[in-house]
């Protein structure tokens, strides 16, 4: 064997050894990844199971710049300890029943000062209508921590709504704030319905405030209407409808029963209401419960009628659906528990949601009421 042949043999042997080592390492990594994935899946399943049993929302919706539905909105954290300016110390519990805009700011921030004209206008226009603005002053420098400096800035800038200092950043951390300025809007129940970072989006913020204030009005009017209707008809739409599957089968068409009681799905682009542009109230085809207004219907291109929000958070219930090897959110009628469809996080503003419904599960009342 000459030197060249010997060298080639040595190189070949080294290559074989290195290849074997690489394959062994790769197999070990794959096994490790499979174990990690299995452990993660088990943890997720345990967490989902615990959430399902508790009845709480499966996943708190924390997206920015979209209107979060009440059923997915996380509860807001309480305010941390601090010095209050322009008001006595206030808690979120004391503010229940009011829409609350929490503005995370500091007086040395140029962008924060640019948002003040809008905040002061909103305070002046909507305070008497049910809005409370709370400025959480989270300092960026030591100079901004001085309470005297904060008081002077609040007076100089013409801020009349309540301001609370957050020198230890307890409230900042509790709300997971990452930049100045950040606006967080809460509904009357203290749930976070909208978050925006930076300047701008003023028109959207005002529209959401109006919507949340109107939600309270709609709820009050709905309660009054239902009370009057109960007196007239001896019935309340919030009463649950419970029937045997045999009774449902006798009342429904075969397709309705398959979709609404057996959780089936009608074929895309075949439903009566997929392309409908008629105005009115979409109610449950099984029990007449008001579900969706035609004002919230939009063209999704999916082949099923789609809406960006229900007429009321009490109109529908949502459950985890793990059928067919995937995890989705099922939507059912809150009154009779009939399957309606699913909700997805790819809808338009203001909610960012797409309630994808089966036409056969709906009935359109063109008189725009929930009654037949």
Image (spheres, helix red, strand yellow):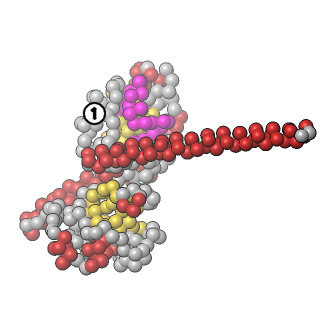
- Looking at the picture, does residue 167 appear above or below residue 275? above
Mark 1: few, some, or many residues within 10 Å (few <14, many ≥20)? few
Q: Residue furthest right?
A: 2
Q: Is residue 169 above or below residue 33?
A: above
Direction from residue 174 to residue 30 in the image, left or right:
right
Q: Is residue 293 left or right of residue 20?
A: left
Residue at x 51%, y 32% (from the top left corner): 109
Q: Residue 372, image x and y in percent? A: 20, 75
The secondary element bearing badge 1 is classed as loop
Q: For the point 81% across and 38% down, which residue is it?
A: 10
**Residue under numbered circle 1:** 91
Residue that appears at 36% across and 57% down: 322
Q: Quadrant of residue 101?
A: top left
Q: Is residue 280 magenta?
A: no
Residue 299: give x, y in percent of width and height.
44, 69
Front position in the image: 42 or 367? 42
Across the whole image, how many numbered discs are drawn on residues?
Answer: 1
- Whether residue 223 appears in this view of the structure is yes
Residue 237 image point, x, y percent: 17, 64
- Rendered position, 29 above or below 139: below
From the viewer's side, name the closer residue of 33 and 138: 33
Q: In the image, which residues are magenta?
A: 157-186
């Amino acid at each position: 064997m000459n030197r060249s042949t010997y060298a080639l043999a040595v190189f070949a042997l080294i290559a074989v050894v290195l290849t074997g080592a690489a394959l062994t390492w790769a197999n070990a990594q794959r096994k490790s990844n499979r174990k990690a994935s299995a452990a993660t899946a088990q943890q997720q399943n345990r967490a989902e199971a615990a959430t399902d049993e508790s009845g709480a929302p499966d996943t708190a919706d924390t997206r920015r710049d979209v209107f979060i539905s009440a059923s997915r909105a996380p509860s807001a954290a309480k305010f941390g300890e601090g010095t209050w300016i322009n008001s006595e110390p206030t808690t979120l519990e004391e503010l229940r029943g009011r829409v609350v805009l929490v503005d995370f700011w500091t007086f040395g921030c140029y962008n924060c000062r640019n948002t003040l004209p809008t905040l002061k206008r909103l305070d002046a226009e909507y305070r008497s209508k049910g809005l409370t603005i709370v400025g959480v002053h989270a300092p960026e420098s030591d100079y901004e921590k001085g309470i005297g400096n904060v008081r002077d800035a609040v007076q100089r800038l013409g801020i009349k709504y309540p301001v609370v200092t957050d020198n230890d950043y307890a409230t900042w951390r509790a709300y997971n704030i990452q930049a100045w300025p950040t606006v967080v809007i809460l509904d009357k129940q203290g749930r976070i319905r909208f978050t925006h970072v930076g300047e701008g989006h003023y028109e959207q913020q005002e529209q959401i405030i109006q919507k949340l204030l109107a939600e309270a009005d709609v709820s009050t009017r709905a309660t009054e209407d239902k009370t009057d209707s109960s007196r007239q008809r001896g019935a309340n739409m919030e009463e649950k409808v419970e029937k045997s599957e045999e009774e449902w089968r006798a009342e429904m068409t075969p397709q309705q029963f398959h979709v609404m009681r057996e959780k089936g799905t009608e074929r895309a682009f075949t439903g009566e209401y997929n392309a409908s542009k008629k105005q009115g109230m979409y109610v449950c085809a099984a029990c007449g419960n008001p579900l969706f207004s035609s004002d919230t219907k939009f063209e999704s291109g999916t082949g099923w009628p789609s809406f960006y929000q229900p007429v009321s958070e009490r109109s529908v219930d949502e459950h985890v659906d793990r059928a067919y090897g995937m995890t989705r959110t099922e939507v059912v009628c809150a009154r009779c528990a009939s399957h309606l469809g699913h909700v997805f996080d790819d809808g338009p503003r203001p909610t960012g949601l797409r309630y994808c419904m089966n036409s056969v599960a709906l009935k359109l009342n063109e008189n725009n009421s929930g009654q037949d």
